[in-house]
Image (cartoon, rainbow, N blue to C red):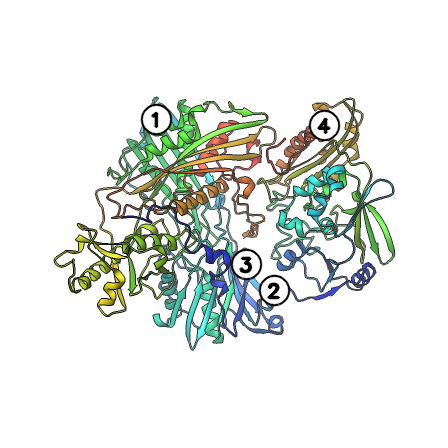
């Protein structure tokens, strides 16, 4: 009975997006709109001494200049500023709260004007003097003072001794620099003022998270603020926490009792979150035939001075491969920067990079094929808990990926494959992420004309949530997709978690099934009241919704059109709102997996690296929409190219300031850097993870890609670069 | 961005008049660099003098067999111009190595000459920069300087000139035609851009009020043995770490004449007669190429992050000279290095 689920379906919002009908946060307006512009701090640490706003106030069209000295009231407890996904430890940043400077690029004044040009011009005229204090933004310096976190996972056995006595050992440090998300859409908020109540159009991955935050910070009733975000032009984790411009737009609207729009510049966005810098030390000990007997993974990651953001880099090496012993350590280095945050596959993009680069080095030390080593260490159980996986078809990922790539034609020795002056390298890596779901509430309103409106306060950050919700609802309600409309991205809609962690497809799809069943049950009750009803005496599970009709499972000819059922009851709609919670499956571990194979070509003289092709074979449970799923994995793989070869946030540590805060100088892959990208979905039926067997795809696409490329670069050149990005100079340095 | 006046120049004389009357005025044509700089508050012109409609769009043969390119000829029109493609493929190739199609469709020949450095500090008004604010100091020295210069630097500035086109123009011995308050004059490409010295705020030797009207190429276009090899941190849409324009005249296996210009390494396209003299009259041999590279880089100096550029330049020069000698110029669409 599934028609749409599993079928390649074009984005239902695609037309609206390419024709400009879809509106983003900065595109909403109001008559009499006020435009805001931010002044940011050039220093990394200290206090504001004096603010001279006279020249700005003299500019025609300037309405007000707001600073910590004269802003409207804001809450004064940390609790108010802690959003749903804030780090547990620390005091969240409070924009325009006081004279303290915590990071370079911090907003220190807000200029309000009748148009955006005037606002940004006036902002450039504000003169602020500071009392500077010494700062540290250099991870290498802060690393020595890093603070140990509670043990991230329970050690197994005595890893140190096992390592020391292993036949073959490998240990090395792997570095990942700070990286920024750089979503295409700039962060923006438009706060529409309506007699003291505000509708805030915001770029966010969680309207209800932002709503709760704003209500607490401005100490107002939930009804006073509504947060709306129908479309998001990419976020990748940068929109999980409320961005400061949302608070500042509301602050400004409350100050001048008018509607306010605030759009951050690209440069200002670099003072939002970022992927933390990190050093990871991996130690691997193995027997001569490639069985691991020790894994040690020690991570030092960076955060701000005022909040402890961290994810669990080491968890991936603790679960993935069979090893008798294992130990983990995680330390946190505090820098005078804004707090780091989640960025696509947080902890896995980085942790698995280090693990999989190290596994490649171990394979070299063992003289073993990298795939064979992984198969030797393959685990059917989560090594941390000993639990079997709800499903794990990674073996098939290795097989299908290797076959598509032609891995069996690889010659093992580095520098052994070439074409002309180009050295050819083939590398591979494993990817892993977790399959999660969160409680969620979905409302469905079915009308007598056979149309269904499905609503939930989730977000579609460009991943295709609108489309998969439509597909699932159409199948569950037995309606064509044209008869389904989706409402999301509005804090007044039924409860949803933030969109992140790859949990939204599973959460909202199962949510739609729950509410869809309630609709079916209501329809059956109504249908049973129709004179001559064929459904008398049938239970809920004996009927289904298909082809626009409620239908007996036993006898498909017993069917009544849904619209007729609703009309016969003399009502114009059936509406149900149901919460879906997920029973904890304590008997299994739940993960998605992938196998990535990459070919690089490196010019022998110059060191220019080209990624000629990448194959990723992904096992991620049920694939709802192969078309959008493929796009999502491709996006992750392209990002993996960037992580391996291009991305690095450059900081002047004397100034404590990010110097390449623009996408001309912060490099991401361009078309010329991206060649053949092949995505293979490996079938994986999962009867345990959730009723629909969905595992999510948001993160898995990027995990392992950087390692596969780094390993390919080694295979091509014989040079092992352990500090990302692998720029051409690192292939010829003599260190 | 600051508020500014906007005016259209009636003709070249009017453009010169308006410019000479206001030293804070800027000419605007394609605006591909100037508008960005204004958004960043790096440039704060009091007036924009729009010259985009002036009759400077012709590409014409000169009486001595060269080519005269109007200052408003678009970069893409120039790169794909039949005469340029055929007779000066080095210039065509260098232009196509730069920016993106969209930018080349807007950017003008004169504007390309006058684009400003991409030094990270020049772009960030919160930091000291002698080029942007004379006397404030050079942050790039001792700072983030991966993209900065290794040749012709000074204690005041280690910025590079970002153009690809200009590197080819330098190699081809182009001449810049300008009109100013005191009439017209020509400036050899080698003298058009300056080294930073202690006045890094001045990028060129243009005098106040002067406007670029044309660029002239001499008759010899090195159409057989040439290449433009640009090395950067991604395969397209990035400024050069090092680029090499090489042009050779080869006769019976010997180099009769050689041109070698480097981009991404100095405050101007870098040429060196001594390095070219090493090549002239010599057989086409690796050792000769390596020696020429050594000579042109003999005074190269790294500043930390950009130390690698010296070795990279050495390798790139040798490779480029090979490409030129073998008649296998670098493709700007296939990113495999020829």
In 3D space, how far apart are the residues under numbered discs 3 and 2 (Cα atoms)?
14 Å
Provide residue A441's location: percent of width, then percent of height. Answer: 28, 59
Q: Residue at point 17% right, 56% down?
A: A540
Q: Is residue A71 visible?
A: no
Tag 1 residue: A286
Tag 3 residue: A265
Q: Secondary structure under badge 3? A: loop
- In the picture provided, is B48 more to the left or to the right than A432? right
Provide residue A669's location: percent of width, then percent of height. Answer: 53, 43
Mark 4 neighbour class, 10 Å CA radius: few under 14, some 14 to 19, many 20 or more: many
Q: Are marks 1 and 4 in contact (CB under 8 Å)?
A: no
User: Dot 4 falls on which chain?
Assistant: B
In 3D space, how far apart are the residues under numbered discs 4 and 3 (Cα atoms)?
48 Å
Q: Residue at point 64% right, 50% down?
A: B103
Tag 2 residue: A124
Q: Say which label, 1 or 3, has the lower sequence index.
A: 3
Q: Secondary structure under badge 4? A: helix
Q: Residue at point 82% right, 52% down?
A: B178
Q: Say which label, 1 or 2, has the lower sequence index.
A: 2
Q: Are marks 1 and 2 in contact (CB under 8 Å)?
A: no
In 3D space, how far apart are the residues under numbered discs 1 and 2 (Cα atoms)?
60 Å
Tag 4 residue: B325
User: Dot 1 falls on which chain?
Assistant: A
Marks 4, 2: nearer the viewer: 4
Provide residue A721's location: percent of width, then percent of height. Answer: 50, 33
Q: Quadrant of residue A398?
A: top left
**Closest to the observer: A495 or A243?**
A495
Q: Secondary structure under badge 1? A: strand
């Amino acid at each position: 009975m599934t028609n749409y689920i599993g079928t390649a379906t074009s984005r239902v919002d695609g037309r609206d997006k390419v024709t400009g009908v879809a509106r983003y946060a900065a595109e909403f307006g109001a008559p009499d709109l006020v435009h805001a512009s931010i002044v940011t701090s050039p220093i990394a640490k200290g206090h504001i001494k004096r603010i001279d706003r006279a020249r700005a106030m003299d500019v025609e069209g300037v309405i007000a200049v707001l600073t910590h000295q004269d802003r409207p009231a804001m809450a004064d407890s940390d609790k108010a500023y802690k959003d749903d996904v804030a780090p547990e430890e620390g005091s969240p940043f409070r924009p325009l709260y006081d004279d303290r400077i915590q990071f370079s690029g911090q907003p220190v004044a807000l200029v309000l004007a009748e148009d955006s040009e005037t606002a940004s011009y006036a902002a450039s005229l504000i003169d602020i003097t500071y009392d500077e204090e010494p700062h540290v933004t250099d991870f290498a310096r802060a690393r020595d003072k890093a603070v140990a976190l509670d043990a991230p996972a329970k050690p197994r056995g005595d890893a140190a001794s096992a390592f020391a006595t292993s036949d073959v050992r490998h240990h090395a440090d792997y570095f990942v620099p700070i990286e920024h998300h750089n979503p295409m859409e700039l962060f923006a908020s438009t706060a529409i003022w309506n007699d003291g109540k505000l509708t805030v159009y915001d770029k966010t991955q969680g309207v209800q998270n932002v709503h709760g935050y704003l209500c607490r910070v401005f100490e107002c009733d939930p009804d006073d603020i509504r947060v709306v975000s129908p479309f998001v032009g990419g976020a990748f984790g940068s929109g999980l926490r409320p961005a400061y411009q949302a608070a500042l737009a509301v602050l400004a609207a409350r100050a001048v009792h008018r509607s306010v729009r605030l759009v951050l510049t690209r440069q200002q966005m670099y003072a939002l979150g970022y992927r933390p810098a990190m050093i990871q030390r991996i130690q691997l000990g193995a027997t001569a035939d490639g069985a691991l007997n020790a894994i040690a993974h020690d991570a030092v990651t960076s955060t701000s001075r005022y909040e402890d953001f961290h994810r669990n880099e080491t968890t991936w090496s603790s679960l993935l491969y069979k090893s008798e012993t294992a130990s983990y350590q995680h330390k946190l280095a505090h820098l005078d920067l804004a707090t780091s945050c989640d960025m696509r596959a947080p902890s896995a993009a980085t942790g698995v990079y280090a693990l999989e680069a190290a596994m490649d080095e171990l394979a070299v030390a063992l003289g073993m094929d990298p795939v064979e080593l992984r198969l030797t260490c393959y685990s059917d159980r989560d090594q941390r808990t000993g639990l079997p996986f709800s499903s794990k078809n990674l073996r098939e990922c290795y097989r299908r990926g290797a076959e598509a790539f032609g891995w069996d034609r690889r010659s093992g020795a580095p520098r052994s494959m070439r074409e002309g002056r180009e050295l050819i390298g083939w590398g591979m890596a494993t990817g892993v992420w977790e399959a999660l779901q969160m409680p969620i509430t979905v409302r469905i309103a079915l009308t007598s004309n056979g149309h269904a409106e499905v609503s939930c306060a989730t977000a579609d950050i460009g991943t295709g949530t609108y489309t998969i919700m439509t597909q699932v609802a159409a199948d569950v309600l037995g309606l064509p997709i044209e008869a389904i409309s989706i409402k999301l991205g509005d804090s007044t809609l039924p409860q949803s978690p933030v969109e992140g962690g790859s949990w939204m497809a599973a959460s909202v799809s199962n949510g739609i099934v729950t509410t869809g069943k309630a609709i079916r049950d209501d329809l059956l009750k109504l249908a049973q009241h129709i004179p001559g009803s064929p459904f008398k005496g049938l239970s809920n599970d004996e009927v289904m919704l298909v082809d626009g009709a409620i239908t007996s499972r036993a006898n498909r000819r017993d069917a009544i059109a849904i619209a007729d059922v609703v009309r016969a009851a003399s009502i114009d709609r059936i509406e149900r709102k149901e919460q879906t919670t997920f029973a904890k499956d304590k008997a299994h571990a739940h993960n998605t997996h992938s196998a990535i194979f990459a070919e690089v070509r490196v010019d022998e003289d110059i060191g220019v690296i080209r990624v000629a092709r990448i194959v990723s074979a992904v096992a991620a449970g049920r694939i709802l929409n192969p078309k959008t799923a493929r796009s999502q994995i491709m996006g992750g793989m392209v990002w993996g190219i960037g992580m391996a070869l291009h991305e690095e946030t450059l900081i002047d540590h004397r100034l404590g300031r990010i110097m390449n805060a623009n996408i001309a100088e912060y490099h991401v892959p361009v078309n010329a850097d991206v060649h053949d990208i092949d995505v293979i979905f490996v079938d994986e039926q999962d009867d345990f993870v959730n009723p629909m067997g969905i595992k999510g795809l948001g993160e898995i696409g990027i995990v392992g890609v950087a390692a596969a490329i780094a390993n390919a670069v080694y295979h091509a050149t014989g040079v092992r670069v352990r500090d990302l990005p692998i720029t051409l100079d690192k292939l010829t340095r003599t260190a | 961005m600051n508020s500014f006046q906007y005016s259209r120049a009636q003709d070249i004389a009017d453009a010169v008049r308006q410019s000479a009357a206001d030293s804070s005025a800027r000419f605007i044509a394609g605006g591909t660099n100037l508008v960005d700089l204004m958004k960043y508050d790096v440039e704060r012109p009091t007036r924009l003098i729009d010259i985009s409609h002036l009759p400077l769009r012709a590409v014409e043969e000169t009486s001595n067999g060269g080519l005269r390119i109007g200052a408003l000829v678009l970069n893409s029109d120039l790169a794909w111009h039949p005469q340029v493609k055929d007779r000066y493929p080095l210039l065509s190739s260098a232009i196509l190595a730069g920016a993106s199609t969209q930018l080349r469709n807007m950017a003008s020949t004169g504007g390309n000459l006058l684009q400003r450095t991409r030094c990270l500090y020049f772009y960030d008004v919160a930091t000291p920069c002698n080029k942007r604010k004379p006397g404030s100091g050079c942050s790039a020295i001792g700072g983030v300087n991966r993209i900065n210069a290794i040749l012709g630097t000074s204690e005041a500035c280690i910025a590079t000139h970002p153009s690809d086109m200009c590197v080819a123009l330098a190699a081809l011995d182009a001449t810049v035609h300008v009109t100013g308050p005191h009439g017209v004059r020509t400036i050899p490409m080698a003298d058009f851009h300056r080294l930073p010295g202690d006045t890094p705020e001045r990028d060129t030797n243009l005098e106040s009020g002067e406007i670029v009207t044309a660029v002239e190429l001499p008759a010899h276009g090195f159409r057989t043995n040439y290449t433009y090899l640009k090395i950067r941190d991604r395969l397209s849409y990035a400024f050069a770490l090092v680029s090499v324009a090489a042009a050779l005249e080869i006769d019976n296996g010997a180099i009769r004449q050689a041109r070698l210009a480097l981009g991404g390494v100095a405050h101007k396209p870098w040429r060196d007669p001594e390095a070219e003299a090493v090549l002239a009259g010599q057989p086409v041999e690796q050792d000769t190429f390596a020696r020429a590279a050594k000579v042109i880089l003999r005074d190269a100096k790294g500043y930390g992050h950009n130390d690698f550029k010296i070795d990279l330049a050495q390798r790139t020069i040798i490779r480029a000279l090979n490409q030129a000698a073998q008649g296998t110029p670098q493709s700007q669409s296939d990113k495999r290095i020829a």
